[in-house]
Image (cartoon, grey):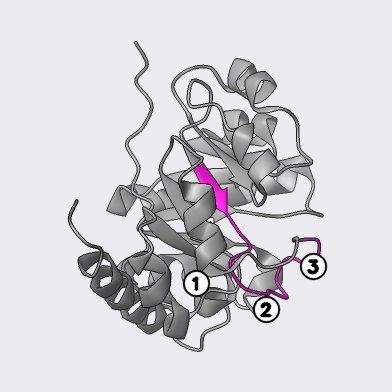
Amino acid sequence: MTHRPSFDLTLYLVAGTDAVGGRPLVEVIAAAVRGGVTLVQLREKTMSDGEMIALARKIMVVLQLFVVPLIINDRGAVALEAGADGVHLGIDDIGPAQARTQLGPDRILGVSAGTPDEAALVDPAVADYAGVGSVFATATKPDAGPPIGIEGLGALMRRIPLPVVAIGGIGLSQAEAVMAAGPAGVAVVSAICGAADPEAAARALRAAIEAGRNAVPVT
C-alpha cells in the first residue's frame, strides 16, 4: 500500500526563473498560491542540481504554509535531496518505471502525453497523473508538438486511465472552455508567471476553471 502525498491538479503552475521577468521566483510563486494555485512544478533546464535543490527548498517553505505540493521537472535526484513531493517527466526524460524505482512509492509521479502513442504508454500502476498537450500553440516550450486543440485533449483523455491536467497555451480566455472538456485541471506558465499581478491572475484563472468545471455534464 502506498502513501503518496495527496494532490489537486485544479490550477497547476509550471514555474522557473526564466519565466518571471527577473522578479524573485519565490515571491511570484507565493503570490500565485495565495491566488489559488493548487500545485507547483519547478522547471529549470540550465540550473545545476545544487542550485535547483537550494531553490526548491526555499519554495517549499512557502508551499508548506498552504499545503501545496512541489513537483520537480525531470530530476529525480533533485526531488529526493530537496524533499520535494514528486517529479514530472517529459517524453524525452528517463522512463517512468525507472523514475518510480528511484523515487520510491511515496512521491507523486507525473508524465506527459501529446499523441495517441504517448497516451498508450501511460501506466496507471506507475504514474499518478498525465499532463496532456500542447492544447494550443505555446512559445513557452518550443519543442512541444503541434497543438491538439480541445477536441484532441478529449480524445487523449479517453485513452488515459489517470487524472489529466491540460497544458499548452492556456490563458484566462481559454481556461473555461478547456475545463468544460473534463480534465482534472489546467497547467499554465506565462498566464501567471508573466502577469504583472500573479495573485490576481491566479484568482481569475481559478474562477474560470471552476466555471468550466461546473459546465461539465453530469454522467
Q: Please tell me which residue is depicted at 27% across the width and 65% down the height of the picture.
A: 213
Q: Position of residue 94 (x, y in %)?
A: 75, 30
Residue 131 among magenta residues = yes
Nearest the eye: 180 or 43: 180
Mark 2 and mark 1 lie on one chain; the one further toward the N terminus is 2
- CB atoms of marks 2 and 1 within 8 Å: no
Q: Nearer the viewer, mark 3 or mark 2?
A: 3
Q: Which residues are magenta?
A: 130-144
Helix, strand or loop at label 3? It is: loop
Nearest the eye: 135 or 15: 135
Answer with the quarter of the image where residue 44 lies: bottom right
- Per the image, the residue denoted by label 1 is 28
Q: How far, Cα to Cα, is label 2 from label 1? A: 10 Å
Q: Please tell me which residue is depicted at 75% across the width and 41% down the height of the picture.
A: 49
Answer with the quarter of the image where residue 92 lies: top right
Q: Which mark is residue 142?
A: 3
